[in-house]
Image: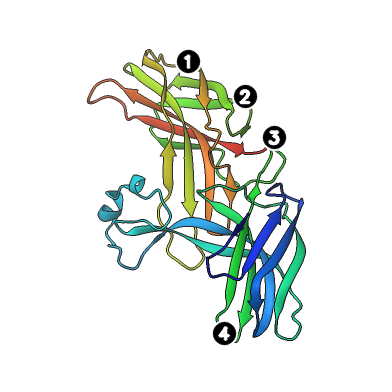
């Protein structure tokens, strides 16, 4: 489907509308009314990359950054506190269009989707083919969007496989049935906990966690945006004994419409199984938090 402003005299159509890395898409650019005074024209394959950056009016204090509610910044273009969601066009490749007598008529070209292409999602990238017509008068741009799906064999970004985020009273392991999970499937595995000393009763839970890390090339990056899915309580009053391992199975739902694991120029999305242990009492052991990375894909 072609996406363009009302005044744009050209439309851009991409087929197929849904594709995969290393497959070919055909781009048709058609003029809906005469376009003259043209100096040059090209068609680009690329994507709009969404990310969070720290805008110029931001306060510099660490305390101010720590108290900002990132949950208020879910939409592109919104502004909350000292950070802002935005997007930038990333051109992956382009092809020039031959122009005769300074007039643009129609054009057709093909692009092969790169093997490393990040999967489409409203949180990271929106793939499109864009026509750019440079004129003596007002330049013209128009986009035709399409969807890129990534599967289990497509390359993904890298992140630490296992992280201990808080606490050190126990040895904690997270094992999943599969490291690669499709959107809409379930994430199953075993959480293993071995206490290193005498500990009070423990409230043990796991959940899926999505992290979008921004790393814009020309702006100051905003902080990571974490999205925690619903908690699954595995053992609200567990007895942990030193040297003994408690193994707890878990079964978590991964939404069908979620963003896949992906790395783009200005931002990255990673997924984790996140486990936490809260100990009873006000003066007891420090809470423990760990997470293990999984790969989420949105194609069979």
The residue under label 4 is: 137
Q: Does 290 sit above or below residue 199?
A: below
Q: Residue furthest front?
A: 33
Which numbered marker is on residue 246? 1
The residue under label 2 is: 177
Residue beneath the point at 59% across and 28% down: 185
Which numbered marker is on residue 24? none
The residue under label 3 is: 300
Q: Residues within 10 Å of mark 2 (few under 14, many from 20)?
A: few
Residue beneath the point at 68% across and 49% down: 17
Q: Does 42 sit above or below residue 65?
A: below
Residue nearest the viewer, comparing 77 with 108? 108
Q: Residues within 10 Å of mark 4 (few under 14, many from 20)?
A: few
Residue beneath the point at 24% across and 21% down: 281
Q: Is residue 275 left or right of residue 13?
A: left
Q: Does 172 sit above or below residue 62?
A: above
Q: Nearer the viewer, mark 3 or mark 2?
A: 3
Q: Is residue 156 visible?
A: yes
Q: SS class of the residue under badge 4?
A: loop
The disc, 1 or 2, on the residue closer to the chain's N-terminal end is 2
Q: How far is disc 4 from disc 3 in space, using C-alphas?
A: 47 Å
Q: Which image quadrant is residue 136 in?
A: bottom right
Q: Nearer the viewer, mark 1 or mark 2?
A: 2
Q: How far is disc 1 from disc 2 in space, using C-alphas?
A: 18 Å
Picture coordinates of residue 23, whole percent (x, y): 76, 50
């Amino acid at each position: 489907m072609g996406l363009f402003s009302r005044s744009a005299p050209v439309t851009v159509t991409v087929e197929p509308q849904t594709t995969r890395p290393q497959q070919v898409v055909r781009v048709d650019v058609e003029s809906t009314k005469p376009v003259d005074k043209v100096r040059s024209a090209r068609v680009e394959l690329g994507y709009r990359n969404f990310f969070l950056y720290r805008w110029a009016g931001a306060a510099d204090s660490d305390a101010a950054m720590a108290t900002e509610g990132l949950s208020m910044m879910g939409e592109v273009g919104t502004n909350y506190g000292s950070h802002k969601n935005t997007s930038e066009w990333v051109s992956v490749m382009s092809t020039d269009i031959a122009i005769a007598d300074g007039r643009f008529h129609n054009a057709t070209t093909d692009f092969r989707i790169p093997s490393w292409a990040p999967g489409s999602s409203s949180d990271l990238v929106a793939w499109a083919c864009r026509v750019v017509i440079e004129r003596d008068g007002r330049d013209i741009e128009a986009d035709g969007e399409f969807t890129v799906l990534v599967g289990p064999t497509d390359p993904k970004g890298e992140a630490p496989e296992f992280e201990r985020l808080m606490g050190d009273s126990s040895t904690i392991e997270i094992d999943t049935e599969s490291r690669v999970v499709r959107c809409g499937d379930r994430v199953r595995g075993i959480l293993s906990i071995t206490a290193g000393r005498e500990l009070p009763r423990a409230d043990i839970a796991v959940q899926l966690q999505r992290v979008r890390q921004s790393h814009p090339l020309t702006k100051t990056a905003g902080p990571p945006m974490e999205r925690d899915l619903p908690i699954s309580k595995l053992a609200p009053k567990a007895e942990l004994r030193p040297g003994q391992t408690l193994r707890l199975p878990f079964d978590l739902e991964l939404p069908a419409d979620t963003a896949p694991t992906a790395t783009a120029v200005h931002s990255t999305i990673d997924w984790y199984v996140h486990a936490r242990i809260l100990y009873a009492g006000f003066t007891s052991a420090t809470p423990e938090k760990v997470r293990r990375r999984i790969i989420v894909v949105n194609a069979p």
